[in-house]
Amino acid sequence: MVQFDTSWTLFLDRDGVINEREEGGYISKVEDFSFIPGTIKALEKLSTIFGRIVIVTNQAGIGKGIMTEKQLDKVHKHMLKTIDLLDGRIDKIYYCPDKPEANSPNRKPETGMAMQAKADFPEIEFSRSVIVGDSVSDMEFGARLGMVKVFIEGKGEDPSVVKPDFQFTSLKEFTAAL
Ligand SMILES: [Mg+2]
């Protein structure tokens, strides 16, 4: 495992890494949001290791008209409040509301959300960044930016095409390996 310190940034995918995925759907209500067991505790430790922790999440449900930005905002406020109460830290959430057909420069695997993070936190270096995600598109996003790629199994996607650097079953397990 790489020796991380506060000069490193952690990019986290949301669905399937922090919270349980909603099969074929979108989480538009706080009641539908549930943390994956062990995640909050993991974030507490990760907060002491990494200088910056940001979330990068595709939320095409907005572009498709299935949920509103206001609903997503409520879900995120709840998530951040819970993490904060338990001594974890997320510096900022970036989300892409665009549907796949929009060819948005922000939708992973495109790198727009990383550029937004770099604009907000100029100290971020992509070569000293880690992406943790459960989709091939997350690994592709990290590959384009030269990040360390950590694949979380569970969604059933085959990551071998993008060769993750590390593979774990959960954020909890990744954190335990640090
Ligand atoms: Mg995901």
Image (cartoon, rainbow, N blue to C red):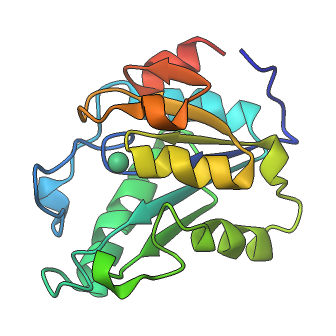
Q: Left or right: where does residue 130 sit relative to residue 73?
A: right
Q: Residue at x 20, y 52 (%)?
A: 33
Q: Is residue 159 above or below residue 62?
A: above
Residues 156 and 10: in front is 156
Query: Is residue 41 at least partly visible in the picture?
Result: no
Query: Is residue 158 at least partly visible in the picture?
Result: yes
Q: Is residue 150 above or below residue 64?
A: above
- In which quadrant of the rendered image does the N terminus lie? top right
Residue 131 position, x and y percent, is 59, 43
Q: Residue at x 61, y 27 (%)?
A: 45
Q: Residue at x 41, y 30 (%)?
A: 152
- In which quadrant of the rendered image does the C terminus lie? top right
Q: Left or right: where does residue 54 sit relative to residue 158?
A: right
Residue 77 position, x and y percent, is 39, 67
Q: Quadrant of residue 7?
A: top right
Residue 103 position, x and y percent, is 42, 82
Residues 47 and 148: in front is 148
Q: Quadrant of residue 114?
A: bottom right
